[in-house]
Image (spheres, rainbow, N blue to C red):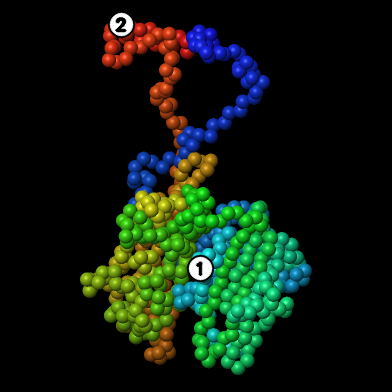
């Protein structure tokens, strides 16, 4: 308004009504700058951002810090934190879901399947492993893509397995699922739990229950070499509301007959579908942000307990990463036994979880002669489970069992995502897992002691992580990663039980996490440079000549205009 009085320009009109309109307003100001505040001091050099594994893990103090390699009998520090408080009622993505079994309202209520809703998956041999759990919000079945989760179950003694392993009712009958994350299992109550209901049972093309079929649940039964109504597939249909609490759990079941005279194994399919009470548009599109399927364990920082993103350099594009869908994996044991038939895939099966120390083990059964042959001649006692890291080297180098090797052996360096949302199309967002030597020397066999030394028996992963970004919203990232190998003496003690006697020899894979605490510093970005645009008539009524006709007099006019402009501003 004041400028308009000093420098009027028609047809412009101005009065103080605009100013009066704001006199009765209350203005509230908050500083939500993304570049101003207190931040973790990560340093400015590559060495401080991503220190070498040798510098990070070489000075481990076993007296003050936990480390599997310090003491093989140390107590584990496994954590089951899911990222939120145990009193929260809502579920978060990836949470396990508590389950109980028993008769409602009675004292027979107890944990079912270890206290969590199961989702059997195939182990290294393809057998159904019921220790896997349903994770909230993570469906394993998509009717559009017909993606399934299959595993096999041995027929065994059909008279026993028919009404045990192959009976679908153990997954649904008298089963209750927690409706909220903080639900407690009470002995005399099913409060905060919903019953698992059967929505339909199909056998071949006929519905035995639901969908216009019968009203009585069929039962598995055994007769001769046949098991009738054996479980073929099971899908849990879980419905949750807008508060992320479970409101219903239904089971969709398919049955089949099993003939033990013609079948040794039976393939089963287990899946879970999550849906909300309101149905959003789930079509694949850029607008729905679901055009590209991509695994994440945080955004951007890792969430505690989520799988570490793992992969290797893409074979067709050196600037991209071929990421493993299930993240970084280490070996899994089958009934405690090492996988001697899995070959290159024997080192998969167990996901490495961010921030969670873990130890996975298996045992290898050998006779004294097989131990000697393994140690001296580097020959597998069955199949071919030894990996040769240096085929051209014939002495001074030990072979290593496949289940102890890193994800991609040494054919390609294993990479882990620095942040939980590392982009597979940008290799700079991934970090190499530095690999140590397979063995210090060639294995040595002592015939007098029946022992083998210097043979690899353990793999040890070490990760260093920290928080970065604003201290009010810290983001977890991986700073450094290393994998190394160790050996323990393999001594045969059953020498008095005959030549065919076997002894179990242990192997293990450990994962250790170390937190790096960073200092914080207050940061305010510098003021922006004073380069701004002004109206074309800011120097009115003075005139500035064009550069083509500029003269000494015009410079004087320009200087005078600048002085008047400054006076107007102040």
Residue depicted at 73% across the width and 77% down the height:
215
Residue lying furthest bottom: 224
Q: Secondary structure at mark 1?
A: loop
Looking at the image, is 369 positioned above or below residue 293?
A: below
Looking at the image, is 559 positioned above or below residue 189?
A: above
The residue labelled by disc 1 is 147
Q: Residues within 10 Å of mark 1 (few under 14, many from 20)?
A: few
Give how far across and how far down residue 47 sits, in percent: 34, 46
Point out which mark residue 460 bears.
Answer: none
Evaluate whether residue 271 shows in this view. Answer: yes
Residue depicted at 52% across the width and 60% down the height:
77
Residue depicted at 54% across the width and 31% down the height:
31
N-term-proximal mark, 2 vs 1: 1
The foreground one among 451 and 235 is 235
Give how far across and how far down residue 463 sits, in percent: 42, 56
Residue depicted at 49% across the width and 11% down the height:
9
Give how far across and how far down residue 134 sits, in percent: 58, 65
Q: Residues within 10 Å of mark 2 (few under 14, many from 20)?
A: few
């Amino acid at each position: 308004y004041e400028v308009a009085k000093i420098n009027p320009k028609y047809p412009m009109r101005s009065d103080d009504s605009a100013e009066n309109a704001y006199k009765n307003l209350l203005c509230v100001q908050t500083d939500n700058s993304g570049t101003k505040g207190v931040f973790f001091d990560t340093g400015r050099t590559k060495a401080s951002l991503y220190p070498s594994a040798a510098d990070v893990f070489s000075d481990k103090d076993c007296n003050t810090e936990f480390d599997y390699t310090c003491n093989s009998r140390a107590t584990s520090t496994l954590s089951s934190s899911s990222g939120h408080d145990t009193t929260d009622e809502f579920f978060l993505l990836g949470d396990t879901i508590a389950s109980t079994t028993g008769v409602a309202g009675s004292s027979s209520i107890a944990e079912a399947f270890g206290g969590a809703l199961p989702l059997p998956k195939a182990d290294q041999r393809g057998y159904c492993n019921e220790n896997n759990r349903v994770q909230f919000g993570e469906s394993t079945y998509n009717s559009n893509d017909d993606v399934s989760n299959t595993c096999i179950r041995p027929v065994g003694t059909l008279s026993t397995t028919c009404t045990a392993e192959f009976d679908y009712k153990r997954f649904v009958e008298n089963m209750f699922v927690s409706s909220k994350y903080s639900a407690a299992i009470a002995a005399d109550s099913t409060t905060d739990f919903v019953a698992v209901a059967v929505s339909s049972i199909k056998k071949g093309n006929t519905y035995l229950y639901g969908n216009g079929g019968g009203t009585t649940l069929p039962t598995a039964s055994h007769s001769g070499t046949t098991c009738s109504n054996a479980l073929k597939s099971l899908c849990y249909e879980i419905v949750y509301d807008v508060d992320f609490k479970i409101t219903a759990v239904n089971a969709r079941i398919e049955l089949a007959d099993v003939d033990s005279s013609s079948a040794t194994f039976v393939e089963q399919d287990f899946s879970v579908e999550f849906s909300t009470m309101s149905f959003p548009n789930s079509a694949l599109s850029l607008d729905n942000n679901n055009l590209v399927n991509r695994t994440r364990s945080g955004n951007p920082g890792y969430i505690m307990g989520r799988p570490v993103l793992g992969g290797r350099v893409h074979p067709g594009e050196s600037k991209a990463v071929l990421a493993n869908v299930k993240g970084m994996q280490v070996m899994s044991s089958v009934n405690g036994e090492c996988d001697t038939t899995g070959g290159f895939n024997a080192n998969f099966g167990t996901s490495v979880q961010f921030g969670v120390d873990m130890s996975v083990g298996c045992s290898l059964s050998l006779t004294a002669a097989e131990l000697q042959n393994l140690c001296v001649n580097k020959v597998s006692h069955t199949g071919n489970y030894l990996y040769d890291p240096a085929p051209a080297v014939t002495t001074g180098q030990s072979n290593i069992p496949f289940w102890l090797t890193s994800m991609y052996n040494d054919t390609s360096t294993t990479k882990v995502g620095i942040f939980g949302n590392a982009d597979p199309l940008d290799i700079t967002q991934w970090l190499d897992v530095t690999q140590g030597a397979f063995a210090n020397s060639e294995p040595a066999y002592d015939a007098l002691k029946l022992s083998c030394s210097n043979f690899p028996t353990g793999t040890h992963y070490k990760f260093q992580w920290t928080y970065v970004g604003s201290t009010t919203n810290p983001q977890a990232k991986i700073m450094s990663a290393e994998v190394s190998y160790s050996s323990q003496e393999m001594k045969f003690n059953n020498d008095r039980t005959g030549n065919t006697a076997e002894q179990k020899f242990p192997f293990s894979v450990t994962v250790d996490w170390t937190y790096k605490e960073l200092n914080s510093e207050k940061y305010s970005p510098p003021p922006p440079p004073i380069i701004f645009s002004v109206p074309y008539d800011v120097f009115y009524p003075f005139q500035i000549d064009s550069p083509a006709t500029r003269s000494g007099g015009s410079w004087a006019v320009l200087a005078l205009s600048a002085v008047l402009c400054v006076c107007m501003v102040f």
